[in-house]
Image: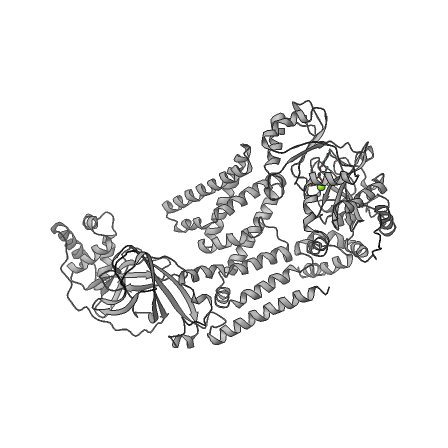
Amino acid sequence: MTSKVPFYIAVIALVIIGIAMSIIRHQTYNVPWVPGETRQIWDIEARIEFTARGKEVKASLAAPSTQSGYTLINESASSPGYGISYNSTSSGRRIEWTIREASGPQTIYYRSQFLVDENTKRDVTPPSQPMPEPKLPSLELSAGKALVELARQRSADNSSFTRELIKALNEPESQNASLLLHTNNKTNALYALLSIAEIPSRIVGVIELEDGRRRQNVQQMIEVWTGEDWQLFSISATQDGKQHPLLIWDQSNVSLLDLMGGSNSRVAFSMIARNISPTEATESKAEADGLLNFSIHSLPLEEQAMFKTIMMIPIGALIVVFLRIIVGLKTSGTFMPVLIAVAFVQTQLVTGIVGFLLIVGVGLIIRSYLSRLNLLLVARISAVIITVILIISIFTVVAFKVGLTEGLSITFFPMIILSWTIERMSILWEEEGGKEVMLQGGGSLITAILVYIAMTNEYLQHLTFNFVGLQLIVLAGILVLGTYTGYRLTELRRFKPLVKD
Amino acid sequence: MLSTLIDLAKIPSRLKSKGVLGMNQRNHAFIGRYNDRAKYPLVDDKLKTKIIAQRHGATTPEMIGVIRNQAEVKLIHDMVKDWPGFVIKPAQGSGGKGILVIVDHDQQRYKKPSGNETSRQEVERHVSNVLSGLFSLGGKTDVAIVENLILFDDCFDGFTYEGVPDVRIIVFKGYPVMAMMRCSTAASDGKANLHQGAVGVGLDIASGKAIRAVQFEKPLTHHPDTKVDLSTLVVPDWRRLLELACSAWEMTGLGYMGTDMVLDRTKGPMVLELNARPGLSIQIANGTGLIPRLRHIENLEVPIKYPTPEQRVEYCVQQFSTETKFNYM
Ligand SMILES: Nc1ncnc2c1ncn2[C@@H]1O[C@H](COP(=O)(O)OP(=O)(O)O)[C@@H](O)[C@H]1O
Ligand SMILES: [Mg+2]
């Protein structure tokens, strides 16, 4: 048994290194062990892509500033070869990139950090100029005046007045509203109506803060002056349901991006929420971009968001290894449950389970017909893949029509994997009968649910994302499990007859 | 509730004291340590097993032919023209999957052990499924082996229902450590694989006599279909069967292995297939654990000249003889 010694030394070394790395991270970067005692920071990255024409380029992007609920603590722009300047203009802050000559596809980044902060200090500047005259043709102007008059009767102040206008604009039967919406989009129509009523307002660009979101676009909303503050209104009628917090990015009322010397421009936002300790929050200018910070946090945000999921996968693997070696649970396909769990994270649990059962169930029925056609294996699997895609698209469309927006997330399921699962289960059905299918399918589902519970656990998420050292400990755990030679739990039942006599 | 929990907690130590081998330990301490991965293809492919077995002078069921691709599927009817009974099986199958047993035919209608007939098309379809890998490990494409039907020895009449019984012997480092006979039942449909519902009868290594019988891992005394008393089962020609099983070690070099053997009416003991990952149910059929015997063999001193199969059989016959454990209630 001497050959085991190096193995255990390696395992212990892994654990020690893992713990040491975590402690260093905890102490030098003040990352707390639990997510509770923290302040939240949003890292938001704007990624601008365009094609330069080979001449001088000037790009100017609206920049966000401290606002109710969020304090801007840090910002930076990166772009090789460009000169950068931050300008305060009459219509808000802008960042400007300039270069003498550039050609071909260009990508430039602007990154800002906001501290979630209940008591933000900010200046509430009242509207400076009176509202401009509405630019509407006479027919639409009178329609607008009618709407404004009606809303004025039904409201008490600026904010309830705006709410009434939004309601009116979302009324599909209203003739006045449809006349206005014929040539304007809803935001512009609301802005025009507010200017008829001479209520100070402005169009702003807003982004929804959702952890791990990538490639989001700016949405247009309207800010209305209530007399002492600016209040934000979304033009979509129903505001209930789960709403993500909103951050106003662009107050300029001009444009999000001005580009000279380039075309095909596109601005996309990625964001990620991070927990920092209160002390770190106060030293707001932390060495976020320091050279010595070799953590995932030094990657571009888009990659970081991806890592949030990737870092959870080892935990999933650990659970699968545990269930197979210690418990002896049968699953169809070793790591298929982990992929299903990743899909569950996107779809939410109940929708995910229903979707999984629907796809596999319908898939099995169709597969049983395919088996009568006597096809070769590759053709059969391909046919199953296409069927799965069809099932998914039908469910998505039906869910959309019925108004179940949760149904849309069904597309997150890994289709090829599901097809193999269906194929394997149907062979199992033919060979061993439905009982074995239920056993293995149930085993997979239970595993997937357990992995899902772990993956969505706040503490585990916090730990795996902030402490890379933890991965080494998980690895050590898996290695140790791999040497377990005792009985599996299911074997206790199986071999029970042997204990009796 | 609590007492059942306490009972459950006691099971592992009791199993351990009985020397029951679990899946993890099997994989770790025996398969992982004694079976060289490079040699797996020898036993995972029944065609290769047949070739090496014949090279070492062991008898195997006679091969009628091999069908290797879809274009040859229709040749099956001509191939079996002169063979009244035959079996089609996937070269890389396991657990009795994809085995079609035909006991009689006129090249139009094919008769199965149950007496049911199948058509030409259905036989062709079965071959085609075998080729496309439906029954094989990992769904890889496979070849179909067509071999002669084994007519089992009359002495097994009544112990098996519509199928050839086979003898599974665990061979460790060339020593036979535990044996059982697997008898097919109506539930197992002419195939002798335990999880399909065949009856497993533990056999005394010394004499080839029945020790205990189980179906679906539960003890029983009589065959469920033929009602024959299973305790009266004795395998004839036992020594030769053991020696044949042991010689599989010389053939493959695999240290921990399950050998499947059959007794043909005219040709005597034959090797049906070899298994690098034999199941653990043999312990339930024998009512005893494998570990004490495996450790015994493991601790044997290895002489310069390794013992011959005859010597190894002789040793195990001395060491591992067991009383019958049938329990009539
Ligand atoms: N040539 C044959 N003649 C009659 N029965 C056979 C023949 N080959 C296999 N069988 C039956 O099928 C069962 C399984 O065959 P085997 O070759 O061991 O394949 P597997 O690897 O699937 O267990 C045997 O136990 C036996 O009952
Ligand atoms: Mg077999």
Q: Is residue A429 left or right of residue B293?
A: left
Who is closer to the viewer here, A4 or A423?
A4
x, y percent for residue A497? 74, 51
**Quarter of image, res A245:** bottom left
x, y percent for residue B295? 79, 57
Who is closer to the viewer here, A197 or B329?
A197
Instruction: Please report the residue visible at 72 percent of the width from the left and 59 percent of the height from the top.
Output: B12
Instruction: Please report the residue visible at 18 percent of the width from the left and 54 percent of the height from the top.
Output: A147
Q: Is residue B311 left or right of residue B115?
A: right
Who is closer to the viewer here, B189 or B127?
B127
Does the rendering let one see residue A40? yes
Q: Is residue A169 left or right of residue A457?
A: left
x, y percent for residue A163? 25, 59
Q: Using the image, determine if residue B34 lies above or below residue A92.
A: above
Q: Is residue B300 left or right of residue A309?
A: right
**Quarter of image, res B84:** top right
x, y percent for residue A186? 24, 53
Q: Using the image, determine if residue A128 lies above or below residue B177.
A: below
Does the rendering let one see residue A156? no
**Quarter of image, res A71:** bottom left
Instruction: Please report the residue visible at 63 percent of the width from the left and 61 percent of the height from the top.
Output: A481
Q: The N terminus of chain A lies in which quarter of the figure? A: bottom right
Quadrant hosting ligand 2: top right
Instruction: Please report the residue visible at 43 percent of the width from the left and 71 percent of the height from the top.
Output: A291
The residue positioned farthest toward the left in the image shown = A138
Q: How is the image coloured?
A: one colour
